[in-house]
Amino acid sequence: MLSPVALAIVVNAMPDPRERARAIGVWASVFGLSMAAGPVTGGALIAAFGWRSVFWINVPVIVVTLVLVAVFVPESRAARARRLDWPGQLLLTAVICLFVGVLIEGPRIGWASPAALVGYALVMAAAIGFVLVELRRDEPLMDLGLFRRPPFATAVLGATAVFVALNVSLLLNTLYLQHTRGWTPLATGAATLPMALGATLCAPWSGSLVGRLGPRRPLILAGGFMTAGGLCLTDLGQDTSVPLILFAYLLIGVGFGFANAPLTNTAVSGLPPSRAGVAGAITSTARQVGAAVGIAVAGGLVAGAGPADLAAASHPGWLLVAGCGVFLFVVARASQPTVADAR
């Protein structure tokens, strides 16, 4: 709920395309900061107080956030409130839950088992039902007409791919370093710092590049770095050198940092503010779907693998990360020129 609202504020508060691109870059760098703070803080909390503490830490964070919102964020609302699209909401939830559930349970039940086939059919039925419902409603949950714009459609798929790659990387990193290498939770969290550093530093730079040159060059850089980072670990073993692992994480983080601003800017460019907010919200939803799918895929790949076999079992996951990077080249090709390009 928070992510679309935050992005909608950025989109509507910055009507100038160049300023908006830079602001989206700063907004995207928050992901990098969270990547730096989250795993390290989580590792320290687990080591000191146990795993339940990673949930209790949210309470003071939320209290501080609510106070800051009450003091600094101005109220804004549409001229006319939209009705809730309960059928669309329920069907979209069903699509995502069923799809992720099949990915998680597939390795256990068998991809061609009767239960899996039923799962595929239910996913397809829910997806078709969602599309039919949304096309017939006056105020749909998701404006499917936006997907007729190739830049928007590819940007949404690109956002999904980026977060698939990010979450595959984070989960495989945690499992590999703790179970195969025997690292502590704190040391495992610290290993993500190169990834977080790349994302934090490159996100504002990417927003500036989008404002001056358009989305294509940052997307090409994002695709190149992410692909290289994934390929570095496709031959991961029990004794792979730590500097190579950290270097690969840095490359993936740099790719992630360069990707967010051009993807979001491409999705909202050329739209009036009212539709740009909706477009930004759909892109945010795509990120959350990508996160859920990435975790499910990574978990499924290494399910049942022992410490000695986990590194080899993770190889398809790192190929997937590289493949997500390659897909960003497709998104870069489809991205339409912005005002900056026209100038």
Image (cartoon, grey):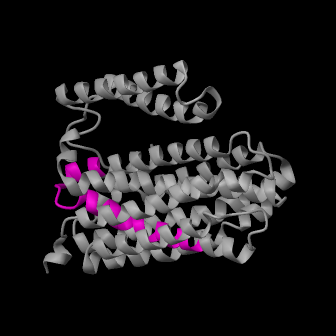
Asked if residue 264 is among those painted magenta in the image, a careful observer would answer yes
Q: Is residue 193 left or right of 209 when viewed as pictured?
A: right
Q: Quadrant of residue 302?
A: top right
Asked if residue 313 is among those painted magenta in the image, a careful observer would answer no
Residue 285, horizontal then vertical, whole percent: 40, 45
Identify the magenta region: 250-279
Q: How many marks?
A: 0
Near-viewer residue (2 or 315): 315
Near-viewer residue (24 or 303): 303
Q: Is residue 62 above or below residue 103?
A: below
Q: Quadrant of residue 162?
A: bottom left
Q: Is residue 319 left or right of 132 when viewed as pictured?
A: right
Residue 247, horizontal then vertical, whole percent: 63, 76
Q: Quadrant of the C terminus?
A: bottom left
Near-viewer residue (280 or 14): 280
Q: Is residue 146 above or below residue 90?
A: below
The answer to whether residue 84 is visible is no
The answer to whether residue 263 is visible is yes
Q: Is residue 209 left or right of 37 when viewed as pictured?
A: left
Looking at the image, which residue is at 22% across and 39% down? 144
Looking at the image, which residue is at 36% across and 27% down? 124
Looking at the image, which residue is at 74% across and 73% down? 242
Q: Magenta residues: mostly which secondary structure? A: helix
Looking at the image, which residue is at 76% across and 51% down? 309
Residue 207, horizontal then vertical, whole percent: 36, 73
Q: Quadrant of the N terminus?
A: top left
Q: Quadrant of residue 323?
A: bottom left
